[in-house]
Amino acid sequence: MRDAPALLLVGTADTKAEELAYLRRTAEAQGARVALMDVGVLGTPPYAPEIGNAEVAAAAGTTLAALAALGDENAAMAAMARGAAAIARQRHACGELDGLIALGGTMGTDLALDVAAALPLGVPKVIVTTVASSHLIPPERLAPDLMMVLWAGGLYGLNDVCRATLSQAAGAVVGACRAVQPPRAGRPRVAITSLGKSCLAYMVRLAPALASRGYEPVVFHSTGMGGRALEALLEQGQFAAVFDFCQAELANWMQGSVVHAGPDRLRAAGRLGVPQIVAPGASDMIDVQTWAALPPRFQGRAYHAHNRLIASVAATDDEKRALAAEIGARLAQARGPVALLLPQRGIHAWDREGEPMHDPAGHATFMQALREHARAPIELHEPDLHINDEGFVDLALAIFDRWAAEGRVARVSPGG
């Protein structure tokens, strides 16, 4: 990265002129070159930004006058978001953008989320916002590598409290631009979904085995945001194959848990033809917040607290059957190779004998339902193993190696 990284600074320069100017000065003092993009619609800033609001509107195929005439601030800012995202993409493609920093309340944050999402993984993105980590922000709108900083005391004008926040944010994005190592176009990447290795341990052997074959393993934590990141990066064409061994997020979404990755989990790989080896790891449980009251419908079920943030309750047989039908339906739509592995002896550490989720009859019900819904093009395997047994990884790798030999997965030489 260049010693003087090129930052795009985004905000409404009419209402936040002083704060944006402070951010610019602080970033420039750290050696950055800053281009300010004004995304306001109605006001006139006290200085001339490098990218004016008229240019942003034009990039959205409209004019400031037309947006003002709408009389609808939401529609106007949505159009400005389209223009801002288009300009950001174009500047990055031309090598004129190394990092993004945006500033806003709810209006500016709404726009900034679209700009961040328009930039690829590896471009540092910082949004300073009064609603950081708020329930107002839908998780699906968060770029996989987005950083958000709470703008404390930042509603109107500069003060010592918000200067502390703004200066940290400026330093963070400049430092990130200098330190970042963007993904390289070298070894093909292979995605793996899992939970912590105390629950699902296969990644401990699987990841180095893939690396030894010349692939770049990338493991996603299936606690909602991890699954969202996986699906988003699949859409960007980042992966040659997927070992999708944890379907907990899909189970959670179907049962109303907050620990989900949205309605499109387990769809992108199939739609794009990315080879996928799938197993139902940890999907016979429903995750809940340990710190919140247990919903009445989960009372009386087997329960395991993993830590003070996340706990799990056992799914009922009907819930397992519904999940099996959904998994089968989604995999049946795949345009690429699919293998479904059904470990007959268990699918997470807590269903072994003596553990709180041990339920052999319930597990058999789940495996039977998955078997019934495994339609073409699904390749079905039913090993007499637990998902955490070494033999499970051996089976998965054998399938992957066969697909590679058949040309269904990109082949590489060990070492890249």
Image (cartoon, grey):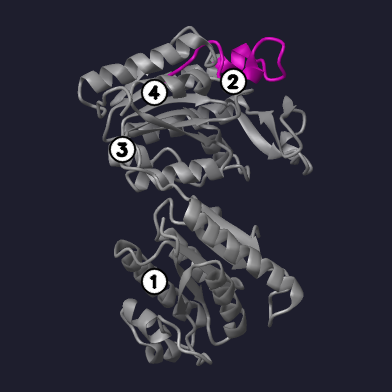
Q: CA distance from mark 2 to mark 1?
A: 44 Å
Q: Position of residue 290 (x, y in %)?
A: 75, 38
Q: Which residue is mark 1?
A: 82
Label 3 or label 4, whichever lies nearer to me, is: 3
The residue drawn where x is 48% and y is 55% is 178
Dominant secondary-structure state across the stretch colored magenta: loop
Q: Tell me if residue 131 can be seen.
A: no
Mark sitting earlier along the chain (3/2): 3
Q: Position of residue 173 (x, y in %)?
A: 54, 61
Q: Which residue is mark 3?
A: 186
Q: CA distance from mark 4 to mark 1?
A: 40 Å
Labels 2 and 1 touching (C-beta < 8 A) = no
Counting labels gives: 4
Labels 3 and 2 touching (C-beta < 8 A) = no
Labels 4 and 1 touching (C-beta < 8 A) = no
Does 30 appear above or below 286? Answer: below
| Residue type, label 1 | Arg
Q: Which residue is mark 4?
A: 210
| Residue type, label 4 | Leu
Does 71 appear above or below 37? Answer: below
Q: Residues within 10 Å of mark 4 (few under 14, many from 20)?
A: some
Q: Which residue is mark 2?
A: 348
Does 302 appear above or below 102? Answer: above
Find residue 21 and report its image quarter.
Answer: bottom right
Does 331 appear above or below 47? Answer: above
Question: Which stretch appears magenta?
Answer: 341-363
Q: CA distance from mark 3 to mark 2?
A: 33 Å
Label 3 or label 2, whichever lies nearer to me, is: 3
| Residue type, label 2 | His
Q: Secondary structure at mark 3?
A: loop
Mark sitting earlier along the chain (4/1): 1
Mark sitting earlier along the chain (3/4): 3
